[in-house]
Amino acid sequence: MTIERRLKPQINVDLTPLIDIVFQLVIFFMISSTFKTAPGIELMLPDSGTATTITITEMSIVAVSEDEVYVNKIRTTAAGAETVVKAELEGRTAADVQAVLEAGAEAPYQLVVTLLDALRMNGIDSVGLSTRSPGKVAP
């Protein structure tokens, strides 16, 4: 007498579609996330009663001291700022570029004027000065 055995079906969970979905979600969040564009320097900005918020800027200049100036996250000095601005403008029309200059309240006025001159020598006339609203506590 022969006994027939029935094969039990093997149940396997296919994880390939799950991995594909998770990978697509990771890519989506990496692309849609926005990151802080400033180089991470805390500045005590001066007060201004007429300050307005600018959401999109094409060139950001952060002045910490004469020896530490950031042009779009590229560290340079006040004397070398003109060269870095010229390099950043490669392939763009200077008249279409808007710049925002951030300098601490304790920054020397000559530093701000030097950076404004560096921008204007490269044809950038649209320059905004970053300030904070009165009564707003610095981060």
Image: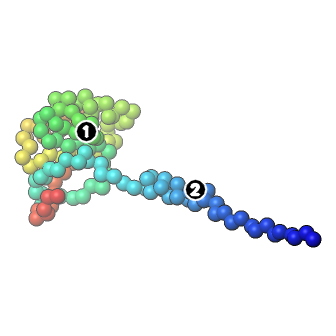
Q: Amino acid at mark 1?
A: Val
Q: Which mark is residue 71?
A: 1
Nearer-the-camera pick, 14 or 78: 14
Residue occupying image coordinates x 61% and y 56%: 16
Q: Is residue 53 above or below residue 112?
A: below
Mark 1 surroundings: few (<14), some (14-19) or many (≥20) residues within 10 A: many
Residue occupying image coordinates x 12% and y 35%: 66
60 displayed left or right of 14: left
Q: Is residue 77 above or below residue 47?
A: above
Is tag 1's residue or tag 2's residue first in the polypeptide sequence?
2
Q: Nearer the viewer, mark 1 or mark 2?
A: 2
73 displayed left or right of 4: left
The x and y percentages for residue 36 are 30, 51
Secondary-structure class at tag 2:
helix
| Quarter of the picture holding the C terminus | bottom left
Q: Which mark is residue 50?
A: none
| Quarter of the picture holding the N terminus | bottom right
Residue occupying image coordinates x 39% and y 33%: 91
Specify whether residue 64 is in view: yes
Q: Is residue 139 above or below residue 110?
A: below
Nearer-the-camera pick, 113 or 123: 113
Give the residue number, with chain letter if any, for mark 2.
20
- Using the rendered view, name the quadrant where residue 133 is placed: bottom left
Nearer-the-camera pick, 129 or 106: 106
